[in-house]
């Protein structure tokens, strides 16, 4: 029963890591850059939802949609103002710039949202349901469904729609894509908007289970990045799988050994895994041009 | 060379004149007496920091209104946020002692932070008053002379009380301990085990968790399997709320008796409806019949903080109550010491004599062997209502 409950929580948190990691993958694949502060984007989603739904009493659905839209706008702003200037100058400083923006956002939220963690009420955490004897909230079951659903949707869209194929073309070769008239800049912006929306969804989903605070995203972001590296930044399914594996491993370690060892062991395990599979679980070695 | 000697001479003359001018300047009229506070002003226990601030502020304004201390010197509160982090607390304490030159320091809710400040207070001979953090080792720190005083609960005494309450109210025979994994949790681990042994109860198990943990089902499951018939909880509001949520998910209805960490934050908001079933300890309640000082303090609070319209709006009340009494006791000690000198104030604290305070009549507050002003007779068991108000449990 202990293990089952740990597995369920692990799959839920793991799906969150997976969603954030998917955000890393999408921007990396299209533009070879990432918003390193994905955790802050996730926090933004949760904080915006709290502000709209709880402080201003907006109806839930409207609040969620608005919060995600605003996250998307934030992603657009990050790409336009923080990443593009450095990439245009062929500078790698976009990485530190995104970290800096994340810190700025965390602190702006600290001033506006407040210093105290707040609880997010949700109809999905009011009652528990029994799954094979373990007590879980309906939210625990919704989270992996949404996470995997989004990953599947992304796969379908990129394969079967024009926009998706355009995105794939840009991923394959930015120069060739430009030659056929695809705008690489738009694709990059779209990737960033998608990535922050994914993070926002993760924030909105996890908020009722944890507490909403300005610092809630930081550790999530680090773990998601570890999951993204583990899964292979170039593979969408790889990062989602790695995220879920990471979450489950964490939960099992906590259940069996106690939470004092969780971070030590889960991050510690990343090292030998990467030593054995340097390109991640599902990544492939990049072809070298000779 | 001639030029160098000339510059040297000029420098010496300038410095000398400057020193003369500075020394000759008239002393500013009535230097304020600075009182320092190092507490959690942000994070999951920010409510506690605010409550302590209010208790100190209201007491200081009362004292200043009657003419201050030491012949017209006004008291001034200087606060620093320790963010519940011992190293930040130590830095803040040093800044207050050396840069702000405070006469005394007040501590906050986090025992690990207070425990880290204790050696500095004793080394620098600065009176350090605890008004919330309950770890036994804060006042019983082995130092002589001991500059640490406390108007607050003491873990070793609270632990006896919690075990006793569990046995009497719920007929508990095998309590399980859920403790935060830090020095405060450890302090209570010790106290609770000893109290259980001396009262004839068996501890079903001791489980620990981290402050950031969200899922305590594993720990609780182990306690349930060990046959625990009650849970003694020692943690601050945020992690304790997650314990309650985990219990909720397990659908395990078991009495939960808690230390007072849960009153330092938004426990009911974070923990959900199960949070209202937890019984915990306080040193004071603003509900029920108040003594004259209690009524007076409520009036002062309502005037100073318009959001407070009644006892229900006094958040984290023990912080305010303890701090209010402690500030008055300190001010009287400074006054009778006739100086702001650490050792003199410390001696004055020990010779304080009788004082009719809010929580009780201190007679005296401290003795050479006991730097803790409150004991088990001053505790009251309470619970939260759905609205987050702390009310006494009916019929102790």
Image: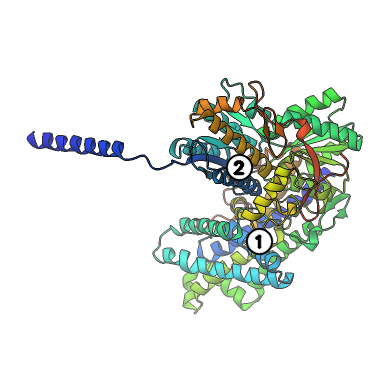
Q: Which of A175 and A67 is in front in this view?
A: A67
A28 shown above or below A230: below
Name the residue that disc number 2 marks: B84
| Residue at image location 87% in from the left, 42% down from the top | B254
- The image quadrant of residue A233 is bottom right
The reply to whether residue A236 is in sight is no
Residue B312: which disc?
A: none
> Is disc 2 surrounded by few (<14), some (14 to 19) or many (20+) residues within 10 Å?
many
Residue B310 at x, y percent in the picture = 73, 54
Residue A115 at x, y percent in the picture = 60, 53
| Residue at image location 68% in from the left, 49% down from the top | A246
Residue A289 at x, y percent in the picture = 46, 59
Q: What kind of element bears circle 2?
A: loop
Residue A46: which disc?
A: 1
Is A114 situated left or right of B19 in this image?
right
Residue B288 at x, y percent in the picture = 80, 47
Q: Which residue lies furthest to the bottom in this view?
A: A181
What colour scheme governs how the chains and residues are painted in the rendered image of this protein?
rainbow
> Is disc 1 surrounded by few (<14), some (14 to 19) or many (20+) residues within 10 Å?
many
The CA span between labels 2 and 1 is 24 Å
B211 shown above or below A143: above
Quadrant containing the N terminus of chain A is: top right
Chain letter of disc 2 in the image: B
């Amino acid at each position: 029963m202990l293990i089952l409950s740990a597995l369920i929580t692990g799959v839920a948190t793991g799906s969150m890591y997976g969603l954030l990691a998917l955000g890393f993958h999408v921007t990396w694949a299209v533009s070879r850059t990432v918003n390193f502060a994905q955790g802050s984007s996730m926090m933004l989603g949760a904080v915006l939802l709290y502000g709209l739904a709880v402080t201003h009493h907006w109806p839930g659905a409207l609040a969620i949609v608005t919060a995600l839209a605003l996250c998307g706008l934030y992603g657009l702003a990050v790409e336009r103002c923080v990443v593009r200037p450095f990439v245009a100058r062929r500078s790698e400083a976009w990485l530190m710039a995104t970290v800096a923006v994340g810190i700025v956002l965390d602190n702006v939220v600290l001033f506006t949202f407040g210093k105290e963690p707040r609880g997010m009420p949700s109809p999905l955490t009011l009652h528990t349901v029994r799954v094979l004897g373990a007590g879980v909230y309906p939210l625990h079951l919704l989270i992996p469904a949404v996470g995997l659903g989004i990953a599947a949707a992304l796969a379908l869209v990129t394969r079967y729609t024009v926009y998706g194929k355009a995105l794939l073309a840009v991923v394959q070769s930015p120069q060739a894509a430009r030659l056929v008239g695809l705008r690489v800049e738009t694709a990059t912006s779209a990737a960033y908007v998608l990535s922050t929306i994914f993070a926002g969804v993760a924030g909105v989903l996890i908020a009722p289970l944890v507490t909403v605070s300005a610092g809630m995203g930081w550790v999530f972001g680090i773990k998601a990045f570890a999951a993204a590296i583990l899964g292979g930044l170039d593979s969408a399914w790889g990062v989602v799988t790695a995220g879920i594996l990471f979450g489950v491993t964490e939960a099992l370690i906590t259940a069996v050994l106690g939470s004092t060892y969780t971070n030590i062991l889960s991050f510690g395990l990343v090292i030998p895994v990467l030593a054995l599979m340097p390109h991640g679980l599902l990544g492939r070695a990049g072809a070298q041009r000779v | 060379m001639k030029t160098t000697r000339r510059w040297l001479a000029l420098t010496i003359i300038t410095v000398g004149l400057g020193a003369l001018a500075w020394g000759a300047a008239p002393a500013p009229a009535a230097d304020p007496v600075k009182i320092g506070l190092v507490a959690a002003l942000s994070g999951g226990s920010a409510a506690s920091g605010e409550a302590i601030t209010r208790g100190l502020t209201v007491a200081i304004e009362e004292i200043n209104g009657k003419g201050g201390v030491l012949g017209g010197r006004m008291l001034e509160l200087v606060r620093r946020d320790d963010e519940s982090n011992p190293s930040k607390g130590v830095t803040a304490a040093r800044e207050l002692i050396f840069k702000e030159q405070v006469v005394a320091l007040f501590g906050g809710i986090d025992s690990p932070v207070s425990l880290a400040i204790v050696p500095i207070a004793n080394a620098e001979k600065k009176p350090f008053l605890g008004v919330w953090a309950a770890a036994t080792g804060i006042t019983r720190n082995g130092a002589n002379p001991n500059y640490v005083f406390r108007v607050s609960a003491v873990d070793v005494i609270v632990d006896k009380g919690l075990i006793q309450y569990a046995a009497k109210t719920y007929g508990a025979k095998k309590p399980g301990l859920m403790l935060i994994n830090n020095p405060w949790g450890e302090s209570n681990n010790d106290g609770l085990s000893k109290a259980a042994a001396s009262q004839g109860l068996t501890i079903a198990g001791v489980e620990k968790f981290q402050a950031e943990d969200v899922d305590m089902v594993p720990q609780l499951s182990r306690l349930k399997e060990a046959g625990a018939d009650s849970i003694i909880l020692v943690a601050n509001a945020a992690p304790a709320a997650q314990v309650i949520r985990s219990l909720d998910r397990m659908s395990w209805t078991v009495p939960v008796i808690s230390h007072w960490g849960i009153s330092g934050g938004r426990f009911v908001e974070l923990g959900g409806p199960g949070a209202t079933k937890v019984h915990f300890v306080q040193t004071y309640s603003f509900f029920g019949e108040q003594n004259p000082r209690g009524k007076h303090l409520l009036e002062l609070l309502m005037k100073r903080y318009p959001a407070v319209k009644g006892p229900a709006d006094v958040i984290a009340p023990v912080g305010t109550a303890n701090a209010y009494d402690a500030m008055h006791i300190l001010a009287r000690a400074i006054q009778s010491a006739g100086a702001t000198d650490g050792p003199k104030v410390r001696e004055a604290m020990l010779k304080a004599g009788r004082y009719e305070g809010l929580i009780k009549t201190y007679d005296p507050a401290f003795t050479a062997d006991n730097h803790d002003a409150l004991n088990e007779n001053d505790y009251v068991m309470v619970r939260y209502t759905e609205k987050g108000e702390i009310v006494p449990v009916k019929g102790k």
